[in-house]
Image: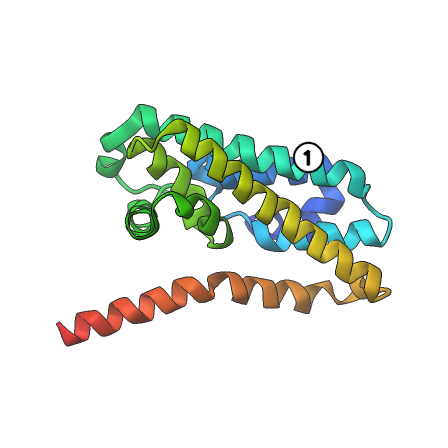
Amino acid sequence: MRLTEFLDPKYLINTFGIIGIGLTVFAESGLLVGFFLPGDSLLFTAGILAAAGKLNIAILVPVVFVAAVVGDQVGYAFGARAGSALYKRPDSRFFKREHLEKAHAFYERRGASTIVLARFIPFVRTFAPIVAGAARMRYRTFVTFNVIGGLIWAVGVTMAGYGLGRVIPDIDKFLLPIIGVIVLASIAPMIREWLKHRKATREG
């Protein structure tokens, strides 16, 4: 399978179904290798296809919720075990230290709410639970925010797609431009942070 196909939400859904969606959400939520996966667009597309009768929404919703929560739990456990060694790990194809550092900076600014907010930011979404584990966030606090974040993100984005698909017939025919808009909306916070950093560097 080519990487471009693996990043195509519709291809993933048509090829692997609900199990594939769950595994993708799990990987992106807490595995170092999952940072490049199309979480937001995948969930929204799955919701639209469920509205078109191509997926069972009653099965889809609990699967993505559990996958998101369990994925973050695994990320937290990995961060708690690996700790500071992660920050010394060299870059590889599936690991970029800069993503970890960005997630750490985000965690420092936002605290426990990072676990909820990071769900909506690519790359940070993957590394936030790992950073929380490495920073020894209180486990009960992490679990609480993890469940809330999983509910708002995994269930919320999926149901948003489902609701739109129910309101607008045959909207699944326009998935490509919709996915494009979702991707742009997802990376907007990162672009904003990059511009702020660039401006601060110039002024400094």
Secondary structure under the numbered disc 1 in the rendered image? helix
Q: Quadrant of the C terminus?
A: bottom left
Instruction: Give above or below for 114 relative to 180.
Output: above
**Residue 30 shown left or right of residue 67 in the figure:** left
The three-letter code of the residue at mark 1 reads: Val
Residue 126: x %, y % from top left: 44, 43
Instruction: Report the residue at 83% width, 59% height from top.
Output: 166
Residue 153: x %, y % from top left: 58, 48
Figure quadrant of residue 44: bottom right
Q: Quadrant of the N terminus?
A: top right
Instruction: Give above or below for 80 relative to 197.
Output: above
Instruction: Report the residue at 59% width, 40% height from top.
Output: 24
Return the residue nearer the eye: 8 or 84: 84
Return the residue nearer the eye: 11 or 149: 149
Q: Confirm whether residue 86 shows in the render.
A: yes
Q: Which residue is tagged 1?
A: 63
**Residue 26 shown left or right of residue 160 in the figure:** left
What is the total number of numbered labels drawn onto the structure image? 1
Return the residue nearer the eye: 112 or 93: 112
Return the residue nearer the eye: 31 or 73: 73
Figure quadrant of residue 150: top right
Residue 90: x %, y % from top left: 26, 39
| Residue sitting farthest toward the left | 204
Instruction: Report the residue at 46% width, 54% height from top.
Output: 121
Q: Mark 1, residues whose alpha carbon is within 10 Å: few (<14), some, or many (≥20)?
A: many
Residue 190: x %, y % from top left: 40, 62
Q: Confirm whether residue 43 shows in the render.
A: no
Instruction: Report the residue at 67% width, 69% height from top.
Output: 177
What's the coloring here? rainbow
